Amino acid sequence: MTTTSQLHIALLAFPFGSHAAPLLTLVQKLSPFLPSNTIFSFFNTSQSNTSIFSKGPKPNNLKIYNVWDGVKEGNDTPFGREAIDLFIQSTPINFVKSMKEAEEETGVKFSCIFSDAFLWFSCELAEKINVPWIAFWTAGSCSLSIHLYTDLIRSNDETLSRIPGFLSSLRISDMPPEVVAENLEGPMPSMLYNMALNLHKASGVVLNSFEELDSIINKDIKTKLQKVLNIGPLVLQSSKKVHSDANSDESGCIKWLENQKEKSVVYLSFGTVLTLPPNEIVAIAEALEAKRVPFIWSLRDNEVKILPKGFLERTKEFGKIVSWAPQLEIFENSAVGVFVTHCGWNSILEGISYGVPMICRPFFGDQKLNSRMVESVWQIGLQIEGGSFTKNGTISALDKFFNEEKGNVLRQNVEGLKEKALEAVRPDNGSSTENFKALVELVKCHK
Ligand code: UDP
């Protein structure tokens, strides 16, 4: 390996859910540790680029490229799974085309391909130009482990208990649907399966997590991959305001929290993608109203329309609904008592980083697995009874947090994990700090 004169890092983003924004956060963190003439070329769809770059300034040495999203000219923009499938079907040709443009425009060959782990074909692109492939797994080590065990899981249900680090708590119903899909040929299952088969070729696999959260799982995946680099939680490091643009408290949530009692508020948010089923929105609303518990609920305008008639008026003394909440600043406030979540990885890690226990209502992807970890392995929260929100199930979950000893135990457990997270990012010798240094060295090297 030799050090190059100029680094040009290709960043390949997966443009759905909360994937592209953490990749950008990572670039912002890496940039000061690399030579000042380093070029970053960021490849992502135009829609996702618009969304993530509207939230703050971009580094000067980062060039943005729009890759084709797979939608033919004149066709309507699809949503949800259809949009994802079209995009996957347009890879890798869409990336290859834009990457060629970037090399021509800058006149500098790529020194490294740093991609979302989903985009496994990056390993073939990197091999072709003889540069390292570094993969970014934007979720936890628990779900990464499950993907690496896809063949074993598909061979027999009983093998689940053989996967290290889950305390025999796993159920087949916790599995990401792609891992247990009837056939692996659909765009998404096939992409994730290929990722599992190819990830060992990556020079490094980077995770926004910390080793001490899942030490047994990490020990195990280190035997399967070349270099496992947990460098998180990114939100506990310098640029935490990158994600949430709430410094100005436009929503008024922070001011509102100042008047609430310690650990009394329920914060509800279900991420950037999900729309809750109407009956569950109504069930939550009825439970909050019946308990008269102070709440902040991040709820989009189209969902607000589903709330029971008069709900906003009747709850305005103790509740607040906003279309986008400054989640990190909310978690920093000691008035927050419990987080009701869909169990997206960023939300889970943010809850842990700020010591907030959780009520889980997972939907898809890694969410059910994350929820299992929260309830059975880390013991920092509860899954909602019956798997979906009902009025009584929601009241009963809130009671456990506010009226029963169980809530205190879960709160103490999450506080313990928060301490470990803070240790991991200690600037002198934290495990994530050390892993970050190793990542900088990896990015600096040429094959
Ligand atoms: N988020 C936020 N305010 C909201 C809703 C979400 O700041 O009102 C942020 C949250 O802090 C997290 C991200 O959006 O960083 C959601 O990511 P996650 O992985 O939890 O879920 P996804 O959006 O991928 O389903």
Image (spheres, rainbow, N blue to C red):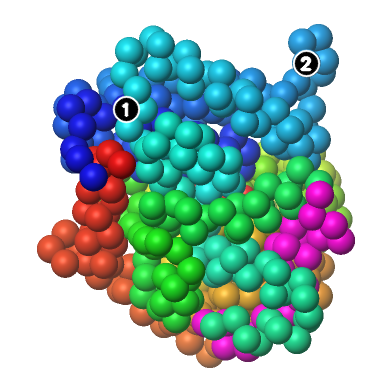
Disc 2: which residue: 72
Please tell me which of labels 2 and 1 falls first in the chain: 1
Q: Residue at x 62, y 38 (%)?
A: 16
Ligand 1 under 8 Å from disc 1 Cβ? no
Viewer-nearest residue: 77 or 401? 77
Is 31 placed left or right of 84 in the picture?
left
- Which element carries disc 1, helix, strand or loop? strand
Residue type, mark 1 in image:
His
Q: Which amino acid, by three-letter code, is at mark 2? A: Lys
Which structural element holds mark 2?
loop
Residue 170, compared with residue 334, is above or below; it is below
Residue 436 picture quarter: bottom left
C-alpha span from label 2 to label 1: 31 Å
Please report contact status of discs 2 and 1: CB closer than 8 Å, yes or no.
Answer: no
Q: Is residue 55 visible?
A: no
Judged left or right of residue 102, residue 339 is right
Q: Which residues are magenta?
A: 165-185
Q: Position of residue 411 (x, y in %)?
A: 46, 78
Local crowd size for mark 2, using a 10 Å CA cut-off: few (<14), some (14–19), many (≥20): few
Is residue 44 at all visible to an observer of this figure? yes
Residue 294 position within the rendered picture, expressed as x and y whole percent measured from the top left:
57, 61
**Majority secondary structure of magenta residues:** loop
Packing grade of label 1 (10 A; few <14, some 14-19, many >=20) is: many
The image shows residue 89, relative to residue 185, as above or below, that is: above
Image quadrant occupied by the N terminus: top left
Split into 4 quadrants, where in the image is the C terminus? top left
Query: Mark 1 — residue?
Result: 8
Quick one: 440 or 209, which is closer to the camera?
A: 440
Q: Which numbered dot is residue 149?
A: none
Residue 72 drawn at (x, y percent): 78, 16
Question: Is residue 175 one of those drawn in magenta?
Answer: yes
Q: Nearer the viewer, residue 436 or 378?
A: 436
